[in-house]
Image: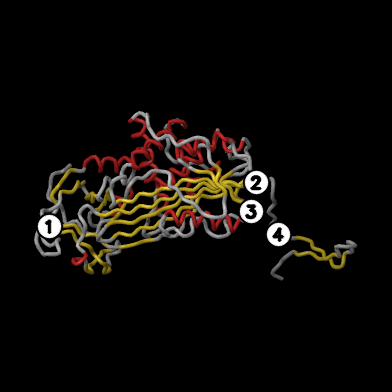
């Protein structure tokens, strides 16, 4: 780390919030049956520390590969890469052959299949300890399976997800009541995210196609270790990339004016580092989680962002050193980005086979190669204020049994002949042809 006085820490841009994994989140909702596995969640971990570190490194690499894939517009961006990794790791448990290899490639998983699931479980066990005795930290995470009733899912697949992910298995009637099934899953995710994620699955997306839906939902709420004083929040300028500025509510953490009494208090020691063209600051929550801010120097945002990857982030985090900071200014904001459909992005990252009927191999789920992923949906919410942070996310993987061999798609996009007939007698009443529909 370069030893230098901290530059004015204003207008930080969030590029990485926290890495969170899955713990079982009990929940219930009317309208579905729960099938209990006879396998209990593994509650102790004997995984090698190197394997756990490898999973974290792989997840970080994926996080910033996904960041660049999503960064196609000049809008705000917020997503939960770990939720995506977790949902697709569960999906990978039922994949074989090239499909499994491609999922691992797209998610940057390098651990063998069995070690991968053990490592996710170990990471979860570590994270479930974070809020065990901390009333100011709430970390609730849900993994669950929703399967078509009477469908012959393999017990080995269900057991793997029960053992390593604490994922319960619930049956629904996607074929007979797709909208009702969609509503049940959305309500369950909403309940587990304190109502922040209302529609994990968009209406109409399960119309008679779903056979298995794999869900992950996350709710996170934590208080700052060093809270901002609400009385100091005021409108201040935020400089946009095009050189213009807007006024936004800016929160202040100051060693001179923090307390309500007006008394000073000792300036906080915060983890900080800087590179040639950026600064990095870590703000801790009241617990073992934190928010990390990366602030490129003026005029350097595009250049710094273009270089951002897992290796660069790991280097930043390793370089952080405790530093006395006089003042921190952070915009107060909340954001609920549009729902993301990840099919095309995940295909580009390396797993196209999983989305192709007749090519995908999810034989580990049902013993056949009839299943394929219809789409992966991701929804998030975040709010940052003087007291702390509230964030939630959901990732939904929808697998279907229908394939191109089971249904037809016909497009009348060339000249055709048509007839009007009496269906009872087959008498032809009218005959015609269309050579040019515009005439």
Indicate which disc, 1 or 2, sits on the residue closer to the N terminus.
1
x then y, percent, for residue 150: 64, 44
Q: Nearer the viewer, mark 4 or mark 1?
A: 1
Q: CA gap, disc 2 to disc 3?
A: 12 Å
x then y, percent, for residue 261: 11, 64
Q: CA gap, disc 1 to disc 2?
A: 63 Å
Q: Give the residue at mark 2.
A: 403
Indicate which disc, 1 or 3, sits on the residue closer to the N terminus.
3
Above or below, 372 against 338 in this view is above
Q: CA gap, disc 3 to disc 4?
A: 24 Å
Q: Nearer the viewer, mark 1 or mark 2?
A: 1
In front of the other: 430 or 226: 226
Q: Around disc 1, counting alpha carbons within 10 Å, would you say few (fewer than 14), some (14 to 19), or many (20 or more)?
A: some
Residue 299 sits in quarter: bottom left
Q: Would residue 390 appear left or right of 407 to someone viewing this image?
A: left
Q: Residue at x 69, y 45 (%)?
A: 405
Position of the C terminus by quadrant: bottom right
Do callouts 1 and 3 mark residues in contact (Cβ within 8 Å)? no
Q: Give the residue at mark 4.
A: 412
Q: CA gap, disc 2 to disc 4?
A: 21 Å
Q: Give the residue at mark 3.
A: 208
Q: Nearer the viewer, mark 2 or mark 4?
A: 2
Q: Nearer the viewer, mark 3 or mark 4?
A: 3
Q: Residue at x 23, y 67 (%)?
A: 237
Q: Would residue 329 appear left or right of 209 to someone viewing this image?
A: left
- Local secondary structure at mark 1: loop
Position of the N terminus by quadrant: top left
Work out which residue is located at the far bottom of the displayed protein and give it.
439
């Amino acid at each position: 780390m370069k030893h230098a006085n901290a530059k004015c820490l204003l207008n930080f841009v969030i590029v990485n919030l926290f890495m969170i994994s899955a713990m079982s989140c009990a929940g219930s909702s009317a309208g579905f049956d729960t099938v209990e596995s006879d396998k209990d969640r593994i509650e102790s971990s004997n995984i090698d520390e190197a394997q756990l570190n490898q999973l974290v490194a792989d997840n970080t690499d994926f996080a910033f590969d996904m960041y660049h894939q999503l960064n196609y517009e000049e809008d705000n961006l917020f997503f939960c890469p770990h939720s995506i990794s977790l949902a697709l790791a569960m999906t990978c448990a039922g994949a074989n052959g090239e499909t499994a290899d491609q999922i691992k490639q797209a998610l940057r998983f390098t651990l063998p299949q069995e070690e991968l699931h053990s490592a996710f479980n170990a990471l979860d066990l570590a994270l479930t300890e974070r809020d065990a005795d901390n009333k100011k930290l709430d970390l609730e995470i849900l993994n669950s399976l929703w399967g078509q009733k009477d469908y012959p899912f393999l017990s080995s697949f269900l057991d793997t997800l029960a053992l390593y992910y604490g994922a319960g298995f619930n049956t629904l009637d996607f074929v007979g009541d797709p909208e009702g099934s969609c509503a049940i899953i959305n309500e369950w995710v909403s309940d587990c995210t304190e109502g922040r994620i209302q529609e994990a699955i968009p209406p109409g997306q399960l119309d008679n196609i779903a056979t298995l839906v794999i869900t992950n939902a996350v709710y996170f709420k934590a208080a700052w270790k060093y809270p901002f004083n609400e009385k100091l929040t005021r409108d201040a300028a935020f400089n946009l990339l095009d050189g213009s500025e807007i006024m936004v509510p800016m929160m202040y953490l100051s060693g001179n004016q923090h307390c309500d009494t007006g008394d000073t208090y000792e300036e906080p020691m915060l983890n900080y580092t800087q590179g040639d063209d950026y600064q990095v600051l870590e703000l801790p929550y009241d617990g073992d989680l934190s928010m990390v801010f990366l602030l490129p120097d003026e005029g350097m945002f595009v250049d710094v962002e273009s270089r951002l990857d897992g290796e660069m982030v790991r280097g930043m985090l390793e370089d952080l050193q405790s530093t006395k900071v006089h003042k921190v200014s952070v915009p107060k904001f909340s954001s609920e980005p549009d729902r993301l459909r990840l099919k095309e992005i995940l295909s580009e990252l390396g797993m196209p086979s999983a989305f192709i009927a007749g090519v995908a191999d999810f034989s580990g789920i049902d013993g056949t190669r009839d299943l394929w992923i219809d789409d992966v949906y991701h929804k998030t919410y975040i709010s940052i204020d003087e007291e702390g942070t509230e964030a939630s996310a959901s990732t939904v993987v929808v697998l279907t049994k229908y394939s191109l061999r089971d249904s037809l798609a016909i497009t009348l996009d060339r000249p055709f002949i048509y007839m009007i007939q009496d269906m009872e007698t087959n008498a032809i009443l009218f005959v015609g042809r269309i050579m040019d529909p515009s005439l």
